[in-house]
Image (cartoon, helix red, strand yellow):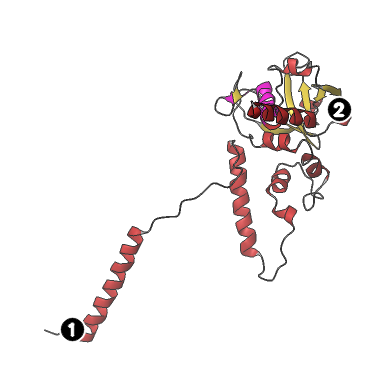
Amino acid sequence: MSLVPVASLARLSAACLVVLACHAQAQTATPAASTPPAGTMMGAYGQSLQQQGTVATSAEKATKPANAAPAATDKQDPVSRFLSERGLLNAAESSAPGRLLTSVRDAASDLVMSAMNFLGVRYVRGGNSVENGFDCSGFTRHIFEMSVGMVLPRRADEQARDSSLLSIRKEDLKPGDLVFFNTMRATFSHVGIYVGEGKFIHAPRTGSAVRVEDMRDAYWAKRFTGARRANLKDAQAKASTGGDASRAN
């Protein structure tokens, strides 16, 4: 019967101790909690865009040379990236603030970007909240009240006839304007919010969700029935004054 050398036994024992120590450390380690990024979008589509943006940013960092110059602020801007991914910025504008990006960041910025946060929220007839879903006029009403403090009438045709809104021509559209369509054999039976470059955001129909579409598509082009514009700066000022007054009382 052969005997195992003492030195071999000692090395074997040391290896076993190392394995046991590593195993114990793995058992007690707690994964770090993940905190959702600021401005997480409410809709399922918006959340998927943010996840894609995070992956894309990580990939860019991994492939970027160590001595490369810092990227321009606008390229890192999630608003710019979001608009570009949705086709709201063309290729020439995606690398720098373009006409649309500039216009979205003026008086209508809060309204338009608030609306985009709800991409993917389901359509529900009569709905007017994230929890219950939106129909077309419930969506526009919610966005205007939430972002600029302006309370619109509940129905699309009532919004079109609201005397506080200015009727404008299609060629004069600006981000934040309300756009109306005839989708139910009625002049103002559908409404959305213009976001620029011929596109608008809306809650389309049962079985779908809040999304951006092109008004120049044949379906929407032949059903367009008008547009309305609110004085957003005035609405924001009134909302601010009302809030200050209520706090004073």
Q: Residue at x 72, y 18 (%)?
A: 156
Numbered marks: total: 2
Measured as percent of width and height from the top left, residue 2 is found at: 14, 85
Instruction: Report the front residue among 38 and 50.
Output: 38
Amino acid type shown at disc 2: Lys
* Lower position in the chain sequence, tag 2 or tag 1: 1
Q: Secondary structure at mark 2?
A: helix
Instruction: Report the front residue among 230 and 178.
Output: 230
Vertical side of 35 occupied by 67: above or below: below
Q: Residue at x 70, y 45 (%)?
A: 79
Measured as percent of width and height from the top left, residue 158 is found at: 74, 15
Which quadrant of the figure has residue 82?
A: top right
Vertical side of 209 occupied by 64: above or below: below
The question of residue 135 being in magenta is answered with: yes
Amino acid type shown at disc 1: Val
Measured as percent of width and height from the top left, residue 152 is found at: 71, 21
Q: Which residue is mark 2?
A: 170
Vertical side of 185 occupied by 205: above or below: below
Assign the C terminus to one quadrant of the image: top right
Question: In 3D space, how far apart are the residues under numbered discs 2 and 1 (Cα atoms)?
Answer: 92 Å
Q: Which residue is mark 1?
A: 4
| Residue ranking furthest to the left | 1
Which quadrant of the figure has residue 247?
A: top right
Q: Nearer the viewer, mark 2 or mark 1?
A: 2
